[in-house]
Image (cartoon, rainbow, N blue to C red):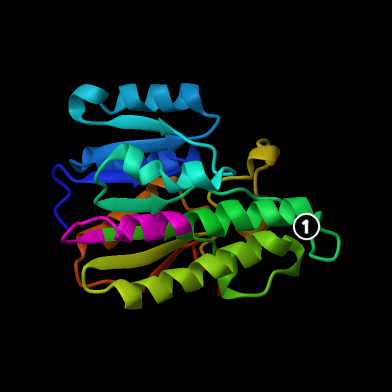
Amino acid sequence: MNLENKTVLVTGGAVRIGRAIAIAFAEAGAKLAIHYNRSGKEAESLLKKIGGAKAGHRIANCEFSDLDAAGSLIQSVGKVDILINNASIYFPCPIAKENMADAERQMEINFRVPLLLMRKFQEQKIKEGCIINLLDRRIAKTHPDDGSYALSKKALAEATLTAALEWAPRIRVNGVAPGAVLPPSFMKDSTMKKQIAMTPMRKAPTPEEVAKACLFLVDNDSITGQIIFVDGGQHL
């Protein structure tokens, strides 16, 4: 897909991996719609960095715990050519000990809202479109210590494959599954030594490398129903 003048909606696009994705697509000629929840200052800063409204970019605030608001996000942005479901939350805990409120919230933010946005996206009257779901290398194996987080990402991975088959050829649906790119937001001082030691490539992937995988999937019109692991081989 030629990105020139295409509108890309990146959920959670103001910080971390989402920010790198937004910058990469803006540099490739797309118009960005950057969704954020609490990162208003970061969203404004990013908007300015990529050229602001004059370049056709915009920001959109939405709390994903409100399903009605989440469902109207695409309509509020306008026509969207590419949807990148990046926003997620992470509360690692074994399922036997997990707080059910946390479990429900992870399933809602990491699975139900992306699925809802996928459905709203495909309801648009567009000739072609592309969806990329940000997953996690944990979808390849069973990770009991990560509880509902891992389950939510596995559910989204299955939705990715199902939608790719159901909505072809008009809409392509793919996934990118990062590994230990950045430490969790509640562990900002972590060096991820343990995670990196478990990685065959012995290094952490960068947000920019994740963004490049997204660009590749959008660019190649013959790819749908694929999940690319950007994890240095950690899923193996």
User: Residue 56 falls in which quadrant of the image?
Assistant: top left
Q: Position of residue 95 (x, y in %)?
A: 79, 65
Q: Is residue 31 visible?
A: yes
Quadrant including the C terminus: bottom right
Q: Nearer the viewer, residue 171 or 228?
A: 171
Residue type at tag 1: Cys
- Within 10 Å of disc 1 (Cα), the crowding (few <14, some 14-19, many 20+) is some
Q: Is residue 198 visible?
A: no
Locate residue 92 relative to residue 62 in the image: left or right: right
Q: Position of residue 234 (x, y in %)?
A: 56, 67
**Residue 118 vertical placement versus 26 (above, below):** below
Q: Nearer the viewer, residue 98 or 100?
A: 100
Q: Nearer the viewer, residue 178 or 158?
A: 158
Residue 120 inside the magenta-drawn segment: yes
Q: Residue furthest right?
A: 97
Residue range corresponding to the magenta coloring = 116-129
Quadrant including the N terminus: bottom left
Locate residue 169 relative to residue 236 in the image: left or right: left
Q: Residue furthest front?
A: 68
Residue at 26%, 55% (x, y): give it.
124
Tell me the SS state at disc 1: loop
**Residue 66 vertical placement versus 159 (above, below):** above
Q: Position of residue 88 (x, y in %)?
A: 56, 49
User: Residue 9 falls in which quadrant of the image?
Assistant: top left
User: Residue 30 falls in which quadrant of the image?
Assistant: top left
Residue at 48%, 36% (x, y): give it.
62
Q: Position of residue 138 (x, y in %)?
A: 60, 66
Count up the numbered dots.
Answer: 1
Residue at 69%, 62% (x, y): give it.
148
Residue at 38%, 27% (x, y): give it.
46
Q: Which residue is mark 1?
A: 93
